[in-house]
Structures are given as C-alpha cells and as structure tokens.
Image (cartoon, rainbow, N blue to C red):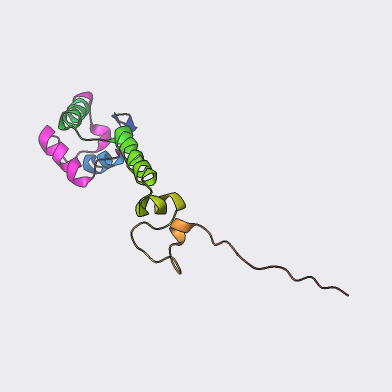
Amino acid sequence: MPRILGVDIPDKKKVPYALRYIQGIGLARAEMILEATGIDPDMRAHNLNEEHINRITSFINSAGWKIEGDLRREIVANLKRLQAIKCYRGIRHYRGLPVRGQRTSTNARTRKGARKTVGVAKKEVTK
C-alpha cells in the first residue's frame, strides 16, 4: 500500500482516485497532479514506484496546498472563531443544528441525532 504524505492510499484503485484519499485533494487536483508530474492516469496505485511517489509529494508541497493536518486545523480554527464571536453560524455549530437555513421542525435528523421523547409522563393508577 503506497504511502503519500502520511496517508495510505488503496492499492487496487487507479491513481487519480487513490489520491482522493488524501484530505484536500479532489478529482480535479488529482488530475492536475498527474498531468504536472507526467504519471499515467490509468496506472494503478500499487504500480507506483518511489520516483513517482517522490514526484507527487514534491509537486503537492511546491503547490502550497493545505492538506491533511493543516487543513483540518484550519477548519477547526474557523469553527472556533465563529463560535467565539457568537454569530448565528457559530451558535448553530455549537448546538449541533443545521447551519445553512434548513428546516428543523420535521427533518434534520442527521444533524440533530436520534429523537428524544419530551414531555410524556407515565400515569400512576391509585386504588
């Protein structure tokens, strides 16, 4: 299993699809990387040798893209900033509710989690 920038990419997939396992690299960037480094896009990831991996790594580093840990840190910092200034989006993130204006009275189960029963009390029977 080839390892690029600390990420194991799958063996059996073609290289442009295998590169997408690195956070911050989508299909467009993967194709750009292969075109710039001169690697065949139809090649499978297990056929990559050390020279190919070094070319891919050096191109990504020289392009100045934020990937993996740096990208994750930036995203977390952005969310913390929104929460610190108490803006609407920050509050929605904090409460675990939909952020972009979706309705919550009926949908939003993915964001809100499983249903919680509220206000139902068991009646006691006295004789």
Q: Is 31 contained in the magenta span?
A: yes
Q: Position of residue 76 (x, y in %)?
A: 36, 40
Residue furthest to the front in view is 85
Image-based side of 113 in relation to 47, left or right: right
Q: Is 93 contained in the magenta span?
A: no
Residue beneath the point at 72% across and 68% down: 122
Q: Position of residue 66 (x, y in %)?
A: 24, 35
Residue beneath the point at 18% across and 42% down: 29
Image-based side of 96 in relation to 71, left or right: right
Q: Is residue 126 above or below residue 17?
A: below
The boundaries of the magenta stretch are 22-51
Q: Total of numbered circles in the picture?
A: 0
Q: Nearer the viewer, residue 16 or 108?
A: 108
* Residue 55 picture quarter: top left
In this orientation, does residue 12 appear? no
Residue beneath the point at 19% across and 24% down: 51
Q: Position of residue 86 (x, y in %)?
A: 38, 49
Q: Position of residue 15 (x, y in %)?
A: 23, 39
* Residue 63 picture quarter: top left
Q: Is residue 96 above or below residue 16?
A: below
Residue beneath the point at 36% across and 54% down: 88
Q: Nearer the viewer, residue 47 or 89?
A: 89
* Residue 13 picture quarter: top left
Residue furthest to the bottom in view is 127
The quarter of the image holding the N terminus is top left
Q: Nearer the viewer, residue 52 or 44?
A: 52
Q: Is residue 18 above or below residue 114?
A: above
In this orientation, does residue 57 appear? yes
The quarter of the image holding the C terminus is bottom right
